[in-house]
Amino acid sequence: MVQVSLSLTIDVLLGLQSLLIFLFAGYEYRTLMHFPTLPNQTGTASSFPPVSIILPVRNQARTVSDCVSSLLGLEYPNKEIIVVDGASTDGTRELVQKFAHEITLVDEQPLPEGWVGKNWACKKSRGELLLFTDGDSVHATDSLARSVSYLQSENADLVTLAPGTILRSFWERLLQPPIFLLIMILVGGKLVNDDHRQNAIGNGQYMLFRREAYDKIGGHYAVRDKIIEDYSLGRLLKRAGMRLRFVTASDALGVRMYASLGEIWRGWRKNFYTVSERNMLPRAVTRIFLMFTFLVMPFAVLGYGILLAAATPLNVYLIAGLFMSGLLWLGMVMLDNSIGVSSVYALMFPLAIVVYIFIGIDSTVRGSLGFGFSWKGRVYGKPIERQLEPSPV
């Protein structure tokens, strides 16, 4: 009797887990399939307002020259480039100085009391539009003209782009696509473009603001205690009732975020715990639990079902495992194919999630105990837990 009851309980739990993963796959399809892309059309020279491009850099000697060169090569008639150096120690500043006759170089420190580097750069800028980008990005010559035209046609206050991902090493191809997938699902994918929803995102690799909108939400000063400041800016903008547009732009922008497992670990570690505005610890623990339950356990169920198949070919573990794992694999195969990554890496999806879970555990321990997160020669502490509110500049 006890054995029958236990078997029934297991069947119910497997059925429930299968149903939830089916719903998860449906949500994934709804939010990520047919994702909007940056249109190709551009306006005429007379329709392009002045744009101030603000590029913060710190210890990015490996990529900064290519980035600045691509910004200088933008086919846009009315732009200025302001590079904010965050006290680099690896030669980044010296590389940027080679472009001194074509850009404005701003030192992040010293700053007026209460300012952060990006706000100080804005103070010195003249553009009606502000483009924030990263030192590991490479821009196509028409990318800015297309982004400005799209912002104007959509009457948007912020356009942020999902770039083409440059993935070269084994660990990049294994870990980055699943992490991108989880982030997109977390924010709601293309639902961020619905003005009636609070879903929001900001990708610091490319954020094109109307200056008045940026000032209204308080700019980077309003999120000065946030490690994931771009995401926080996107949420502030939506809460203020303004228009956000998020589109893919693999032919306009390329980014190689991290080049090794160590960089991937440290980079995502600083984000995992701090992505929540409040109740960081319980939310981080919940995310770890959900990832293990719904993204790792289905493959363990499948493995157990395969072991039992010799004696019981159509056992419930095999059927449920194949169903759940197949849905998860299908999603990863479609994503990898869309960004030019071999489907072989999609088959290693369980390994990628296990590694990311350990990154999450590391982040949660460090964040909850106040150890901080090391990144580019600095240690960033746990941000103050408070409701995001626009702050006057």
Image: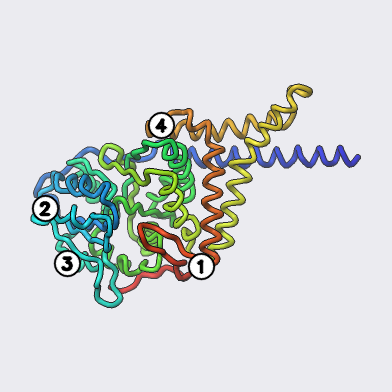
Q: CA distance from mark 3 to mark 4?
A: 42 Å
Disc 2 marks a residue whose amino acid type is: Asn
Q: Residue at x 79, y 23 (%)?
A: 311
Marks 1 and 3: which is nearer the front? 1
Q: Is residue 309 visible?
A: yes
Find residue 254 and report its horizontal and vertical position in percent.
29, 41
The residue carrying mark 2 is 78
Disc 1 marks a residue whose amino acid type is: Gly
- Looking at the image, is 251 positioned above or below residue 151? above
Task: Specify few, some or many for label 1: CA neighbours under 10 Å numbering under 14, 14-19, or 20 or more.
Answer: few
Disc 4 marks a residue whose amino acid type is: Val
Q: Secondary structure at mark 4?
A: loop
Which of the numbered marks, if any, corresponds to residue 370?
1
Q: CA distance from mark 2 to mark 3?
A: 16 Å
Q: CA distance from mark 2 to mark 4?
A: 37 Å
Task: Specify few, some or many for label 3: CA neighbours under 10 Å numbering under 14, 14-19, or 20 or more.
Answer: few
The residue at the far right in this view is 1
Q: Sequence order check: which comes first, mark 1 or mark 2? A: 2
Q: CA distance from mark 4 to mark 1?
A: 37 Å
Indicate how the structure is coloured in the image. rainbow
Q: CA distance from mark 1 to mark 2?
A: 45 Å
Q: Sequence order check: which comes first, mark 2 or mark 4? A: 2
The residue carrying mark 4 is 341
Task: Specify few, some or many for label 4: CA neighbours under 10 Å numbering under 14, 14-19, or 20 or more.
Answer: some
Q: Sequence order check: which comes first, mark 2 or mark 3? A: 2
Q: Secondary structure at mark 2?
A: loop
Q: Sequence order check: which comes first, mark 3 or mark 4? A: 3
Marks 2 and 3: which is nearer the front? 3
Q: Is residue 310 left or right of residue 106?
A: right
